[in-house]
Image (cartoon, rainbow, N blue to C red):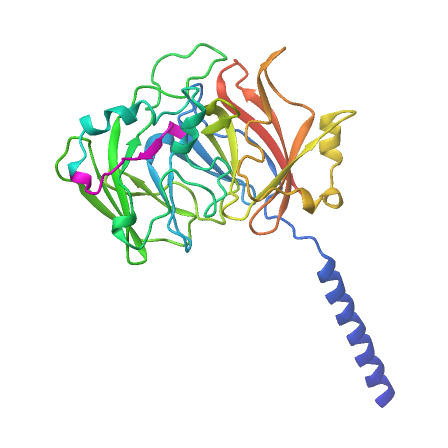
Amino acid sequence: MKKIVFILLIGSSFISQSCINDNDDAIMVAPSDGAVVNPNVGGATQPNQVWIDLGTNTEAVTTRTDWDFAFYTGNSFKVVLNSSIMMAAGKIPNATHIDLVTDASVAALKDEIQVANFNPANETYIDDVKGNFPSGYTAIDEIKANDSENAVYLVNMGKKIFTGNVPSGSVTTGGDSRGWMKVQVVRAGASYKIKYAELNATDHKELIITKNTSYNYNFVSLGKNSEVTIQPEKKKWDLCFTVFTNLITGAGSYIYADFVLTNNVGGVGAYEVKVTSGSGVEAYNNFKASDVDPSKFVYNDQRAIGGNWRNPVGTNGLEVYGDRFYIIKDAEGYYFKLRFTRLTSTSGERGRPQFEYKPL
């Protein structure tokens, strides 16, 4: 009887150890089986920002003009401008009190604090295009604990969304000017306080922003004098389809349509696979988990996909590059392969992209 019990114990131990080893080597299985996705960018004026979560195959849609400033929720105190509407900001020299700033006193600055005016110097008025925050540069300096060390800024509020007609195949990323504001951000304990007003106002409004660490940022709309919900929670989105202010070497800031950002602040990584021979579709279909190269993931630049997936001036007109696809690692550790299949609608309207993806 003792021999039988001993054999059973040994067998049970062997089975248990085998299961542990199998689990150690297991590949995480994503909750989504993949899909063909048509992000609701909104057409040729591209009015929307679309936040995609690959793991759950869900999207959240916001209008580009729904927000003005994003306040970082980590340990640092950083403020980010809404680059999708061409915002820019610059320090007002010698300004110590926001209420004393007037339109006349900043008139000369207005010509400088611009986006897409082909002046290489204008890149100092936008945020780090890599989006590598909190370490990346921001047009508004990191907010100091001492109020007097925080400058008053002249803020170019960017462009409204264009409301006119756009020819087929074209895109219009901005409409009329949204005007100018004077802004100062200070700390309020562990929170932020933003002071703001129109240029000739002799008093200002204030808003306290308490960091919500479930999100990468707290977002604020000055027009609504309140916080607004824009991005999903930090672990619940991977990609954003948006208009984007990027840089052109030697020409400064420039506005791009059909841009795709990764949630690098939330821990998402991505890299491009370029097919040098054979069919791009076949290479995508055959790509498997064992082909993933962890050393290639880009975590410090939100433009890992960017505009590299499409060619707006191709010999065949608007086209998606067929020789490349992308590998995504989301914040929860799941891997996906993704390829773009369309830049326009079937009738040729810009701002109607499509992509397919599958978990690895």
Q: Is residue 36 left or right of residue 101?
A: right
The residue at the point 37 percent across, 21 percent down is: 174
Q: Quadrant of residue 342?
A: top right
124 over 333 or under it: above or below: above
Query: Of 313 and 286, which appears nearest the observer?
Result: 313
Quarter containing the N terminus:
bottom right
Query: Of 3 and 24, which appears nearest the observer?
Result: 24
The residue at the point 48 percent across, 24 percent down is: 256
User: Magenta stretch: residue 98 in it?
Assistant: yes
The residue at the point 84 percent across, 90 percent down is: 2
Task: Mark yes or no: residue 243 visible.
Answer: no
Residue 27 point in image, percent of width and height: 69, 53
Q: Is residue 76 left or right of residue 132?
A: left
Residue farthest front in this picture: 94
User: Magenta stretch: residue 269 in it?
Assistant: no
Q: Is residue 171 left or right of residue 102?
A: right
Residue farthest left in this picture: 202
Residue 132 point in image, percent of width and height: 50, 43
Residue 122 point in image, percent of width and height: 41, 27
Task: Mark yes or no: residue 154 visible.
Answer: yes
Residue 340 point in image, percent of width and height: 61, 28
Query: Which residues lie in the magenta part?
Result: 84-99
